Amino acid sequence: MIRFSLICEREHEFEAWFRSGDDFETQKKRGFVDCPTCGSSKVQKALMAPAVSTGRKREKIALAMGEAQKQAMAQLKALSQKMRENADYVGDKFAEEARKIHFGETDARGIYGEATPEEAKGLIEDGVEFMPIPVFPEDSN
Ligand SMILES: [Zn+2]
């Protein structure tokens, strides 16, 4: 038996058990899978979206389901790793450090860390170039 997280067209999330992934597809095609809240049979597998804490900011993360998504995920992971490889981790001092580097008050170098939405907004206003990097559940930072 496999448990699937499902979501209906009205975005009610619920869980249901199936013998297999094929069993789910078959039952769904026959209209046997319906939402316990509104009875709609227009349901699909929900993307798992656990809230993962990255410092003070909380991000949503999608679990890759299809092959194309898995490939995109692998590429994102590789990119995310590459961006951090030669960069200093500065934790929640990111905004402070980025600003110092931008204004030439400290050595120019790659850094990464966490910033609150307010800090990120402030950096944009100061003309500091930065970008969010994807964070994965297995990342310890
Ligand atoms: Zn529903």
Image: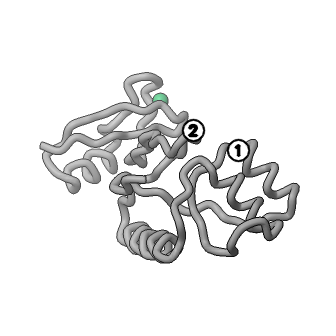
Q: Is residue 121 left or right of residue 28?
A: right
Q: Assign the N terminus to one quadrant of the image.
A: top left
Q: Quadrant of residue 46?
A: top left
Secondary structure of residue under mark 1: helix
Image coordinates of residue 42 in percent, x first then y, are 45, 42
Mark 1 surroundings within 10 Å by alpha-carbon count, few (fewer than 14), some (14 through 19), many (20 or more)? few
Q: Does the numbered disc 2 mark a residue whose Cβ is under 8 Å from ligand 1? A: no
Query: Taking the image as drawn, is residue 42 in sight?
Result: no
Q: Nearer the viewer, residue 60 or 131?
A: 131
Viewer-proximal residue, 132 or 74? 132
Mark sitting earlier along the chain (2/1): 2
Please name the amino acid that badge 1 sits on. Answer: Pro
Compared across the picture, whether 24 is left or right of 91 comes to left
Residue situated in front as seen by the camera: 75 or 81 = 81
The amino acid type found where label 2 is placed reads Arg
Which residue carries the number 2 mark?
56
Percent of width and height locating residue 59: 54, 45
The one nearer the camera, 123 or 65, is 123
Instruction: Tell me the tag on residue 117.
Output: 1
Residue 116 placement, left or right of 41: right
Q: Position of residue 66 (x, y in %)?
A: 37, 65
- The residue located at (49%, 75%) in the rendering is 79
